[in-house]
Amino acid sequence: MDRKNRVAWSRASALLVLALIASQCTPSQPASRRAGGGVQSDAAVAAQKTYVAPGDLDEYYMFSSGGHSGQIYVYGLPSMRHLSTIPVYTPYPATGYGFDDDSKKMLGELTWGDAHHPALSETKGDYDGRWLFINEMNGRIARIDLRDFKTKQILGPVPNLHGNHASSFVTPNTEYAMMATRFSRPVPNRVVGIDKYATEYKGIIAGVKIDPKSGEMSLAWQILMPPFDYDLGDAGKLASDGWMFFSSYNSERATGKLEVTASQRDQDYIAAVDWRAAEKAIAEGKGDVIAGVKVLDPKKVPGIVYLMPCGKSPHGVDVSPDGKWIIGSGKLQGVTTAFNFEKIQTAIRNKDFTGEEDGIPVLKYESIKDAEIAVGLGPLHTQFGTDGWAYTSLFVDSAIAKWKLGTWEVVDKAPMSYSIGHLAAAEGDTVSPDGNYLVGLNKLSHGRHLNVGPSQPESSQLLDITEEKMKLLYDAFTEPEPHYAQIIKADKIHPIEVYPKEENKHPMAVWDVKDAGVTRNGKKVLVKVVAVRSTLTPTSFEVSAGDEVTVAITNIEQTTDELHGFGLLDYNINVVIDPGETKTVTFTAKKSGVFAYYCTNFCSALHQEMQGYMIVK
Ligand SMILES: [Cu+2]
């Protein structure tokens, strides 16, 4: 049997087994599971659609936000297997992230971050597989290189902007990633009483410029905004290219018990930002420098931002694949609103305003909306499929509504288990969505997994959206806390498996064991280590108590999977070095005595022998 036949055969036989198991076991499933709602599917069909046989690969990568774990989780679709964890804002001993000098420096004083919205880089509004950006509440944004799935840069905390929630949405050619304030505060930050919130506290929208070659991020400009809570965003594309939309709540400018005080008005706002106009204003020298950043005040620089009224406390704001509609979802109502981009432009030209907020014109709602779609209660976030299909998550209803752009007809609803937040469709926020898979990122999921105590596992649900009715295929455990995810075709990403030796320009790299060893410069000691199966060379070294020790480890392997670790006991050090990579770790030899170091990452039959001693005299 050739490989293809073997795979087909193993797949067919496995499916038969699964079908049998499904047909026999389904009726006897615990009542709690079956009573939990959720679209009921034929288990055998669902199994067939999600089963990826041993040795076969998934069709998609899904990059899921790790919330306050500060990480990104990588899943394969349709299997929903957790493939990898990319540490971003939090140390991760499994890869040694946050222990070596470079990643430690990148994390700075913050070893915690609340990561929310991953954004894949785009070319012409389509994912291009180069980089992944993700925001974090402490005013930061990070870039991961998809060549090696490693965090390469963390920008921030940026000044003036506090609580970077409405981020890291990228523009269609990755000109910018965006940031916006959730917690308004005085700009620049200083002590001002909360009683002056409405007038003295400010929000900020920021444009982070992305270098088209290197991906290097730099803070380009900020816009001074009224003290609303900016929530989510999406970039205009095609018809609406050049614009950026941010939802916000608390147009009441309230403080205290926001659940009451910030829900008084029937409408809040979506901010529509002409980012090219902002860019131009900065190039013309406009803006005031606040805390070292060029800040544009819409009172002094009109024409860069407008406010679109949107029903009660909008969360999601999502631009349709053709860029013609902006879908705003007020989370405290039963409809989602489709705004027409052309009408927005006409209203701006005709000055069809109903008022202003801190110098920013408010567009007339009736003039810019096309439809209010009765999707259901608590609409949060919308993704898109093929042929104008749109999918809106409903937090209160705990369901997904399927509806059509243009006709605004709601055709299907799929219950979720339970309380869906965001949702992610395959390439579902690009100019060309794939329309086959949809994942509900549920906030609560009681009853969907074996009970593991009060910290109930969260659940993501995979749906098939190729047919008229949405069908539930799979429940997958997800690490806390899923906020948003993006799903990209697997063949768009081509990660390397080893770092080529010729690319290693690290000044402390050593490629031959004869170059390994200790050099001393006063109290500073440099230990160059070669890691290769199955020895860490040198196998011992001596330093004196109080020395500042830098250990530079080069993994000289050029073979896939041959990672080595350098764990130093009692010193809180564990570095993992990929094939061809050099990493350094610097510490003060405070404790005297004998301390073992060893390879922490299993590498060969003689992995256990890969060890040595540091002697601190
Ligand atoms: Cu090893």
Image (cartoon, helix red, strand yellow):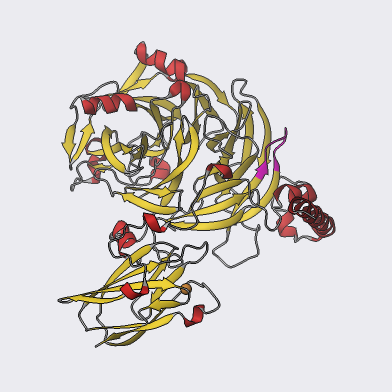
Name the residue at the top extreme: 350
Image position, residue 500 (x, y; %): 43, 56
The residue sitting at 35% across, 45% down in the picture is: 164
In the image, taking residue 300 as reference, residue 241 lies left or right, namely right
Does residue 264 sit above or below 599 in this rendering? above
Residue 107 visible in the picture: yes
Q: Position of residue 588 (x, y in %)?
A: 24, 76
The residue positioned 29% from the left and 38% from the top of the image is 203
Q: Quadrant of the N terminus?
A: bottom right
- Judged left or right of residue 157, residue 263 is right
Q: Quadrant of residue 235?
A: top left
User: Is residue 464 shown in magenta?
Assistant: yes
Secondary structure mostly taken by the magenta-highlighted segment of the chain: loop
Residue 163 image offset from top left, x and y in percent: 34, 47
Left or right: 165, with 18 as reference point? left
Q: Quadrant of the C terminus?
A: bottom left
- Magenta highlight on residue 270: no
- Residue 583, percent from left and from top: 35, 65
Give the extent of the magenta segment.
Answer: 463-471
Give the total of numbered labels: 0
Taking the spot 50% from the left edge, 37% from the top edge, the residue there is 127
**Quadrant in which residue 573 is drawn:** bottom left
Front residue of this view, candidates 538 and 614: 538
Q: Who is closer to the viewer here, 481 or 119? A: 119
- Horizontal placement of 448 versus 168: left or right? right
Front-most of 595 and 318?
A: 595
Above or below: residue 55 compared with residue 508: above
Tell me which corner region of the image, top left, top right, bottom left or bottom right, holds residue 399.
top right
Please report the residue visible at 58 percent of the width from the left and 26 percent of the height from the top. Answer: 373
Can residue 357 be seen by looking at this rendering? no
